[in-house]
Each structure stands twice: as C-alpha cells, then as structure tokens.
Amino acid sequence: MWNEARWLKVPMEEIRRRKIYHGDMTGRFAYFRCEMDLPDKVHLTVDITASSRYRLWVNSRPVLSGPCKGDAWRQYYETVELTDLLVPGRNVFCVQVLYNDPNTAEIQTDERAAIYGVMGVQSGHRLAVEGDVYNEDDIVVGTLTTGRADWRVWLDNSFYLKSSDITCYLGAVTEEIDFSRMPAPWKEKGFDASGWIKAEVADTVLPTSILFSVGVQPKFRIREREIPLLYEKEDAFERDFSRVDGNEVGLLEKGSITVAPGQNVELILDAGAVKNGYPRYVFRGGRGGTVTITYFEKFGGQGSDLRRTDYENGEISGLTDTVCLSGEEICYEPFWVRTFRFVRVHIRAKEEAVVLLAPNFRRTGYPLEVDSYIHSSSPWVERLWDICVRTLGNCMMETYMDCPYYEQLQFAMDTRLEALFTYAVSGDYALARKALIDFHYGMQPEGLTAGKYPSAYLQVLSTFSLHYIYMLWEYYQQTGDRETVRFCQGDIDRILDYFDAKIGEDGLVGRLEFWEFVDWQPDWSEFSGIPRALQQGASTIINLMYAYALSCAGSLFAAMGRDSLAGEYNSRRTTILKAIQELCWDAEKGMYREGPECCQFTQHAQSWAVLNGLVEGEAARAVLTNAIEDKACLKCSFSTAYEWFRALEKAEMYGAMRDCLNDWISLLELDCTTCPETPRGSRSECHAWSALPMYEMVRTMAGVVQEGIGWEHVRIQPNTMDLEDLQGKVATPKGDISFRYEKADGVWHYSVELPEGMEATFVYPNGSQVRLNGGKVQM
C-alpha cells in the first residue's frame, strides 16, 4: 500500500534545542502528533511503521505497538483499521517513537537500556504512516500520510529507558520520568501542540529510484507483517493487599485513594495470575511527590520457593518504574509491555495530597486460539493444563520468548518446544513459521544460526542450531508446508557440516566453538550449563543430539525428494552411533557414560540414546530404569524433560512418566499460575519450555498422535495413567478430535469423534487395534 508516504524524522533544530546529540539518542523518545477535523461517517485504514519501536494512540485511546520484530533485512509494517476510533470534529493521532541503538547503549555507563530483541536500523527516530480518510462516497476528506499531513514532533530529553540488575541489559526495561519536565498530556485532545516543530520529511518509504531498480537496497527494507496483530484488551486487578497503618485500604473497591501531604503509602495489587500488559495509572495533584511502581511475579524473589502469594514472609523484588508528579492530572502508561502478577505502588506525597485512581491494564499477547482442552475429575489435571496454556500464551508476542519478564528473547531451544506446545492446542502455525524464517535470517558465516534471533547483539549457542533442525522437521510433519522448508533447507547442510568438521580421531564430535549449552544442571553450573564431559573430550549428549539431527535431516530431505543427501546424512548417523556405542557404553552401569573419558551419567544421554534407537524394547527400559534409580545420575530439568518423556514413551514406561509429572503437580501447592524456569529455585516464574504437561496430556494421556506428514494418519493410544476419566478435544489441521474415556466397574469405555474424512488407528491398552473413520465411535 506504500505509495506516497515519506519518512518523518526529528529536525536538527529540535535536536539542537533539546541538546541531544550523537550517542545520546538511544533509549529516548520522539512524540509525533497530528490533528485533523473530520465529518461524521468516515473510514480510515492506515499502514504504520517506525525505525525502532512505536506505540499509537487515537483520540487518547491506545491502539497498538509495533513494528513487528524484524532485523536489518526485514522491517515490518502494520495495517490497522481505525474507523471505530474516529469522531466527528477534532481527531488527534499520536505516536510515541523509541530509537533503539543497542551498540551505543552497550558502552554507556549511565544504566541506559537497549531492548535487544528490537533490531532497529541506525537512523534516529523515524515514523512512516500512509492512509487517507474517506467519506461515505469514497471521497478523500483527510489524510495521515506522512509527507502530506501536518505531523508535529517533540524530542523528549527528560529521560531515557534504563536497565537494572534485574534485567541485566537484556529485554525488560524501566522508566524514571519527571512529568514536570515533559509534556505529560501530549496524547490528550485538549493539549496545545502549537509550539511543536513540524516533523522533517525525508526519503520515500518504498524507493522507486534507478538505484533501487538495479538492486541497490534502501536502508529500510519494508515488508508486510507476517503474523496477526497482537491483541489488547481491558483487564483489571483482582484484589489488593494494600494496608495503611495496619488497616486495609480497599483501593480496588473504593476506586481511589488519597495520600495526605507528607504521607508514605504502599499499595500491593494482585492480577490473579502472571500476565503481560500495559498498566495504566491516573494521578491527580501531588506536585513534587514521587511514585515507585514495582512489578514482580511472586513474593520471595529469585530462587525462592515460598508460596507465590506469601505476602507475610516473601520479599518484594522486581522491575521498578519511578514517576515524579507535576501536580497536573497524569495518566501514566509505560511504553514497553510489563509482565507481572503483583504490583507494588509506593507513593511519597510532599506538600500536596496525591489522589490515585484504581489502576487497570490492557492485557496483550499473540492472538492464539486455544482449540484443544482437557478435563478430568482429578482436580490437578485442569489446573495444571491452565497454567501450562497460560505460560505458553505469555511467551508468545511478536516472537516466541524464553520468558516475558526478563529476557524476552527468541532462543532456538525454547522456541522449538513452544512450537510443539502450540501444535498441541491450535491450528495457528504463523508464529512457528515466522520463527523458522527468523532463525534462517540469523545464519552466521561459520555455519551456525544465532542462538537467539532477532537480537541486536549476536549470541551463538552451538547446540541450539540442532534444535533449529528438529524444529524444521517437526514443523513439516505438522503442516506439510514445503515452501517454508525449501526456504530454510540450505541451512541444514551448513549446520551439519559444521558439526562434521568437529569430529576427531575417535570418530566423535569434540569441542565446539561458542556456547555448548545443554541444561542448567547444578553440577555444570561452573560451566554455564555445558556438560562436564567436554572438559575431558567429547560429550555423549551432544554427539547423540547431532545424530538425532542427522536423522531429522535425512527424513526431511527424503520427503523433499533429495534422496542422495538423505542417504549421506543417514550414513553419517550410522557412523557416529557406532562410535558412541563402542566408546561410551558402560556395561557395568548399564548406561551410557557422559563421554569416553568421563564417568558421569545423565538421564539426558540415556534419553537421546533411546530416541536414536541405540537401545530398544527391554534394553531401553533397562537403561532408563537405571537412570531413574541411580541417585548419582543427573536428572533432566524442565528444559530437557521433553526428550526424557519421549524416551519413556518409546519404552512404554508410562508409570515413570506419571511420576515425573509430580514435579509440575507440586507447583499447584505453591500457588503457581505459570510454569517456572526450573522445578525449584527458579529465576523466571513464566518460562514456556516448562509447559510440557499440556503436550503430554494431548499426546500421551489422550493419546492423540499424528503420523506421516500433515496429519495424513492419526494414532489414538490413550494412557490415562492413574486417572479414572479423561475427556477433551484436540485441534488438528483437518479438524478437531473429541474424546471421552471413562472407567466404570474396573472397565474402561472409550468414545472418539473424528472429523469427516480423517482416518485413525485406535490402540487399546492391551495392544489390540481398530481402524476408525470420520464420525463418532463408541468402544
């Protein structure tokens, strides 16, 4: 749609007036404002983007944030319908634009933060909007198109985004704002912007010059957003722990609180669960007073295992915004999304009383439609399902994220698991597809993809490139999307060749470059999650992960008709597995050592061995049983539990799977509303790689497993463990599968309803099978 729009930037006159020069722009904001008088019954759709990050308001109402996260080769724009926000008469359009230059912020000494998940082009504050207002007769009666409309700009020199020891210069940021130094009501209709300078017009958004036509690329490579807009919906805090002088305040019930001159008041609000949102606070009066607002996921801070609601004993530690009041009515909403379950608002009034209206927030996230559900009379089932689904949803924004509170970054290992969990509950694969494309754009010359991407500073985790291969194969199995596979398939050969080049004289992959992360094991803490075996030679885990990646690559290329390359990968796999068997098997322990020269044993190595088919049947059950019973054998944490569960499933050890679920069920006693990063002593309270039970409830307990490509066939093999009943619905690309399993007088009764045209095999606990076709079947 970009036809006439020009980029707007801050004029040099404004930069000089605010005394913000090169190296001091990052983390700061420019406010763009356009006013327009409109008749009744008009309609408006706009395209909008900005250099790093923006937030749009129309007539004082927040609309959306953007642009969608891209990189130096992909700058996205949003298309948004604004008709319902327009009114007859004066309309005000406001855009807050952040300039994010992490290369500058990294060398700052003033705690300046960069949002590393945002890869803004180095250009300063830029804004582009295209859209005309039409009346009922489709006649243009106004425009927002930059370069034609009268956009005004104010460069804010009063504050910049900060980081802290909580965020560690990663994703989340904090604000320290003195509202007496900035135009606080600049988004309001009645604000007088006549003193603002006219925004400077720069180059066109889509160049049509001869340079562009012969392949010379513009600085901004604009493309349409590939995923839906994030939702924003009104939400409210459910309760408060607020007390003054030992008395309950009842802020939420009363609707406001007045803090007398000289008084200090601390209010604590509970959102009921960990959520992502844009909080909104309205203050009246209180000139010179200060307010600190702390967002935290649980009482107790990092590493604490108190009940998450333990207000009496748990400390409060978290991201903190600071606001200095001007005496005017102020509506404060942080620019960057906040993640929280609890919020502490600490008000320090000076000479003038402060009135705080009951805060609320706009909850936000990726608009995932959760079409699957699970129900059982056992109370833990639905409760655990809910916290897993909430965890996944909180970690889905414009990318998948490891955690929304801290880093907010798309790591390949985390993302592969999040994609699998998404497949279990929804037929929406857009975010998974974009993640694969993101990692493709993150490929490095060495032959590995960036460990997290998009990211404004490069971090390579060598093992995570293997997870990218797993994810690509699993995506193809789920969707049959050959176009995306063809786009990314060249990366596979580069990654596998990188690992092949690291094979030593013993026939095993040795030390890799970069970060060879596997799991946050206490015994590996001095090595930052790298297996101890690598200090002495090769790691069995990493070699088995490499072998599994060769298997995925072989299957993928065979499906794509590239049989020669598939054969090469399968041959390499056979060779590496032979070396592992010869060098790493310990007959005395009945397990695989963690390396030829390392006597440590791990559940990780045993699970990967089973998945690679090194041991099968009774032998596999023996190996996994030894790994469970040996107290010295390192256990898989939440992050690596997926492979452990798949190995137990392959060995048909469902009782052991049920025992493992207790680590998650115990979270319910701690009042967790999301899954923490690790079973105990967690940093992050919401970490999507830990949401595994939702996947197990669908795949293992309900027993719904896709076979072939794109759900061309389905196997239904219930394993209800110790439950007395289970029912629900599983979303598939070909329609929903409904099921009901009930035990009566010691006998199980099964009911399954398939979409029309779907074929399935139902497998009874005794191994007998029956073929099913579309429709409802009682068994």
Image: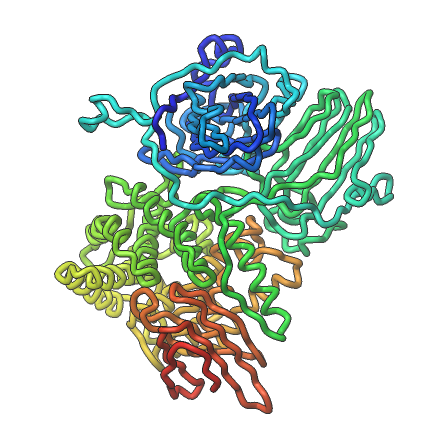
User: Can residue 463 be seen at all in this image of the molecule?
Assistant: yes
Q: Quadrant of the N terminus?
A: top left
User: Can residue 595 be seen at all in this image of the molecule?
Assistant: no
Q: Residue at x 39, y 71 (%)?
A: 705
Residue 588 relative to residue 255: left or right: left
Q: Residue at x 79, y 41 (%)?
A: 251
* Residue 50 higher or lower than 568, as above or below: above
In the rendering, at what x and y percent does residue 257 appear? 81, 35
Q: Residue at x 62, y 18 (%)?
A: 182
* Residue 287 higher or lower than 629, as above or below: above
Residue 229 relative to residue 226: left or right: right
Residue 318 relative to residue 740: left or right: right
Residue 422 lies in what quarter of the image?
Answer: bottom left
- Say how many tags the image has: 0
Residue 726 lies in what quarter of the image?
Answer: bottom right
Q: Residue at x 33, y 71 (%)?
A: 707
In the rendering, at what x and y percent does residue 469 appear? 30, 55
In the rendering, at what x and y percent does residue 100 appear? 45, 28
